[in-house]
Image (spheres, grey):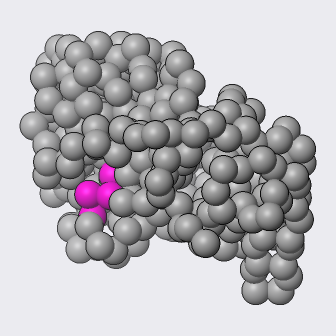
Amino acid sequence: MKRQELLTALEKVKPGLANKEFIEQATSFVFMNGRVVTYNDEISVQYPVPDLNITGSIQAKELYTFLNKIKDEEVDVQQTEIELVFTAGKASAGFALNNEIKLPVLQLEQDPKWLDLPDDFLEAMRFVLFNCAGSSINPIFNCVHIRTDGYVESCDNNRLTVYKTALKKLKTSLLIPANSVRLLLQHKVVKMNLQNSWVHFTDGQLIFSCRLYEDKYPSTGQILQMEDAKPIVLPQSLVAVLERAVVFSSTDITPQVCVQAKHARLTISTRNNTAWFKEWVKIDSPTEFVMYVNPEFLLDIIKNTSTAELSGFKLKFTTDKWVHVAALIHI
């Protein structure tokens, strides 16, 4: 069989591997029904390997490394009762094969009813993900919330983003952990299916499954309300400033910049372990404030709209697709 085809399949399912085998075979590639499967209790990934008609599990690390190191494009695969033998040119390697599948492989319904995802679904998930910054206060703020009306939102108690999608109405809302969303965004999935406490996505070949977080998401409607709001316009020159700031914030686990409005200036500042950056632009602001924000996210906002509403301790940006509200610190 083609080495690269098998290697591609293994790369697709690697995100579903566990770092430690807290579940039996969670660090293994499981082969069954012409597919390779991984499962780590948070996500599970399946991908077809029709040319490898075997059933069983193999430790993932050694197999993946071997296939990645050899240069021959054709690989011969032979199965014995206890192992799987790969031969490529002059090199051969045998891998212990466990014929008994103990991993709780997710079985979809025989004829699952897939829901078509709108073209803007992945963009919505990417756009709201910035708010999920690893909150230790409440795990629910580390999730992306897909509402029953098709809106996608996230909140970290300081920021709220709500994105309107064309997703058809759902029977129940979904809470997907941010780490699962980050991995999902690596694939161009086009359909979704909900079964029990898992949601499944597919691009036609790959099936990417996420365990849902079970809780009730707090109502965010009140956060969107703005009393006695005053308009504020962010200058387009801020785009170039933020692009420079990104360089200095990129080494942070959670990149962020400080945005300070004071004395008719909007100052952007940030630092990492080895360097710092500060630059200001002119602005006409009705009040002085400070906010902390991911620079790439603010860039996305400004490229769509430079007009905002300022009300009390909140700054609100609105387009026909999304709304973002950020909490401010008055100075």
Q: Indicate left or right for 63 with 331 as reference.
A: left
Counting the numbered discs, the total is 0
Q: Is residue 140 magenta?
A: yes
Q: Indicate left or right for 212 with 177 as reference.
A: left
Q: Looking at the rendering, which quadrant does residue 288 occupy?
A: bottom right
Q: Which residue is drawn at 87% across and 52% down?
A: 282
Which residue sits furthest bottom? 274
Which residue sits furthest left? 196
- Tell me which segment is drawn in magenta: 139-144
Residue 6 position within the rendered picture, expressed as x and y whole percent measured from the top left: 55, 41
Q: Which residue is drawn at 42% across and 35% down?
A: 162
Image vertical order of residue 40 relative to residue 195, above or below: below
Q: Which residue is drawn at 35% across and 17% down?
A: 167
Image vertical order of residue 208 relative to residue 118, above or below: below
Image vertical order of residue 245 relative to residue 317, above or below: below
Q: Is residue 58 magenta?
A: no
Residue 246 position within the rendered picture, expressed as x and y whole percent measured from the top left: 79, 60
Image vertical order of residue 237 relative to residue 190, above or below: below
Q: Which image quadrant: the C terminus?
A: bottom right
Q: Residue at x 49, y 47 (%)?
A: 311
Q: Which of 33 and 115 is in front in this view?
A: 115
Q: Indicate left or right for 77 with 281 as reference.
A: left
Q: Looking at the rendering, which quadrant does residue 248 occupy?
A: bottom right
Residue 30 position within the rendered picture, expressed as x and y whole percent measured from the top left: 32, 50
Q: Indicate left or right for 21 with 125 as reference.
A: left
Residue 208 position within the rendered picture, expressed as x and y whole percent measured from the top left: 37, 38
Does the magenta stretch mainly form a helix, a strand or a loop?
helix
Q: Nearer the viewer, residue 115 or 240?
A: 240
Asked whether residue 211 is in view, the answer is yes
Q: Looking at the rendering, which quadrant does residue 179 occupy?
A: bottom left
Q: Which image quadrant: the N terminus?
A: top right
Asked whether residue 84 is in view, the answer is no
